[in-house]
Each structure stands twice: as structure tokens, then as C-alpha cells.
Image (spheres, rainbow, N blue to C red):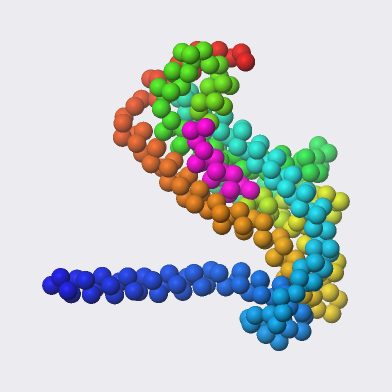
Amino acid sequence: MKDRMSTNKKIKQGIMYVVLTIVAVYTLFPIYFLFVNSFKSQKEIVASPISLPSSWDLTFLKNAAEQIKLGESVINTLVITVVAVALIVLISSMTAWMMVRNKTKGSTFLFLCFTAAMLIPFQSVMYPLVSLMENLGLKNTFGLILMYGGFGLSMTVFLYHGFFKGVPLSLEEAAVIDGANIFQLFFKVVFPLVKPITATVVITNAMWIWNDYLLPFLIIGNNDSKTLTLSLYYAKSLSGQYGNPWELIFPAVLICVIPILVVFIFLQKNIIEGIAAGAVKAEQEEQNGESLVERSHWIRTIPKKF
């Protein structure tokens, strides 16, 4: 009986490994296809698109970097990504914390508004929003950062809200007794405790902003301060008159993908840990039966001065 159970278990594990291997190959094949063709000439790509290149020549990567103005595009994209992510993290974390610690009908309604905003597709507000930004004179890099900050708030507030429920109130009360004001309480006591979810928020929003094409296309367009995706789109040499110049397209796309791919590979563990930790903390808070409504109003007594 035990031998039969052991055999069945091994068969199930074998089937699972085969399925996971197929899924892994299916997922990684586009990256392989992009990588190997970034080192081939046009003729070699057409002749054998799947095989390895005959020589690992960096000339194609160099030509593609010149065509998309790599240095300028990377700086613009980096500035937009860093500032927008910082804006999202700062505003959403403080907003979620105050909503958790001030359990009123107003805070509940506000949280429902943030949650409902996640269900609104961007396409439904795209043209009115672009028209508004044009009337305000914000169809530029600054306006793009503000729009990224606005669109990233709803999901980020939702994530922080669940995580802040697991932060012990006793720590905050102790800090207030020691004389901490509201800013010291948040930045020195509360915010350091939510590093896992902050890492998740930073990674997911950075990947979205770095790879985004539609919003920069609508707001920045063909201005001088292009992002990587826009530079790739507007590079005239990448749209050949008699066909696609694959020897430039593949390495240009690879250059755009490499930075965020490297970040994701090294930090993907934080995404899973952050979301899982937030769910566990929220569940523990509910199981403990601690009434946030009864204990939340103490925060109003915190000194507001710096």
C-alpha cells in the first residue's frame, strides 16, 4: 500500500515538473528570441531567427543605442520613474495610514473611492484627461509625473491599507508618550515597519512607468524629452521604407527591456513577500479582534508641530 502511494506521488510530481518546465520554456522563449536576434544581421535573422548568432557582435547594440539616443532617453525615463514612484509612495502611505488610524464614515467612504477607482479603465478617461492637461499647460514631463502619481494612488493605497492594519498600535502610542509629533511618528516609527510592502509598491510601479508607452505618447508626444519607449517609436531608422530593419529593432527593444528586467530578477522575491506579509498581518489583526474604531481616535491628540 505504501509503495503504491509512493509511486502515485512520484508520478504526480513528475507530471507537475513536466508541466512547469513547459510553462517555463513558453514564458522564457520570447526573451531568448529577442536576445539571440539582437546580435545578428538582417540576413541572418531572416535565415535562422531561432538559432544562436554566428558571432556575438556588439555593433548592432551600439547602432541601436545611437538611433534611440540612449543616454538622453534613459535619463528622462529615470527621472520620470523615480519622481513619480516617490510621489506615489509618499502620498499613498500617509493616506492609507490616516484612514486606518481614523476609522470614521468619511475614511471608510474615501477608502471605497480609492478601491472603486481601480475598476475604472484608463481608456474611459483618456481623452478628457488629456484635454484637461492641455488646457492647464501640463502636456510636459511635469504633467506626466502628476498623472502617473494620480493613476498609481488607488492600488497603492489599497495595498498599504491592508498592511497598516497589522502595525501594532502600542508602538505608536509609546512613541506619542515619548513626545513624538505626527511626522516623527510616521517616518521614524510606522514607515520603517512597512518595508516589504514598500518594496512591492516601488517595484510594481517602477516597472509600469518604465515600460509604459500610451501615457507618454499622449502627454509628451514628439517633444525633446522622450522616454525610452517613445524614442524607440519615433526613431525613423527603425521603420524602414522597404521592410523592417530587424538588426536595429531587436537590439533597441533589448536595450529598453534590460534595466527593468534586471531589477525584477533581483527583487522579484520582495513582490511576493510584500503581498503575502500584508495579507497575513491583516488576517492576524482580524483574528485578534482588536477594535480599531475604539482605539483610533487617540491619534488626534498627537502634537502637529515639527
Quadrant location of residue 228?
Answer: bottom right
* Quadrant housing the N terminus: bottom left
Q: Is residue 129 visible?
A: no
Along the horizontal axis of the image, is 26 left or right of 65?
left
Percent across and percent down for residue 85 are 65, 41
Image: 231 above or below 18:
above
Provide the residue span drawn in magenta: 192-206
Percent across and percent down for residue 281 are 39, 37
Image: 26 above or below 170:
below
Along the horizontal axis of the image, is 288 left or right of 49?
left
Query: How many marks are shown on the rendered structure?
Result: 0
In the foreground, 25 or 104 = 25
Who's the residue at 43% across and 30% down the image?
167
Percent across and percent down for residue 168 are 41, 27
Who's the residue at 58% across and 14% down the image?
304
In the foreground, 96 or 2 = 2
Q: Is residue 137 magenta?
A: no
Who's the residue at 58% across and 48% down the image?
203
Quadrant location of residue 258?
Answer: bottom right
Percent across and percent down for residue 31 are 61, 69
Who's the residue at 40% across and 22% down the image?
170
Image: 226 above or below 170:
below
Which residue is at the far bottom? 47
* Quadrant housing the C terminus: top right
Q: Is residue 11 visible?
A: yes
Q: Is residue 194 magenta?
A: yes
Determine the main secondary structure of the stretch shown in magenta. Answer: helix
Along the horizontal axis of the image, is 144 left or right of 156?
right
Quadrant location of residue 152?
Answer: top right
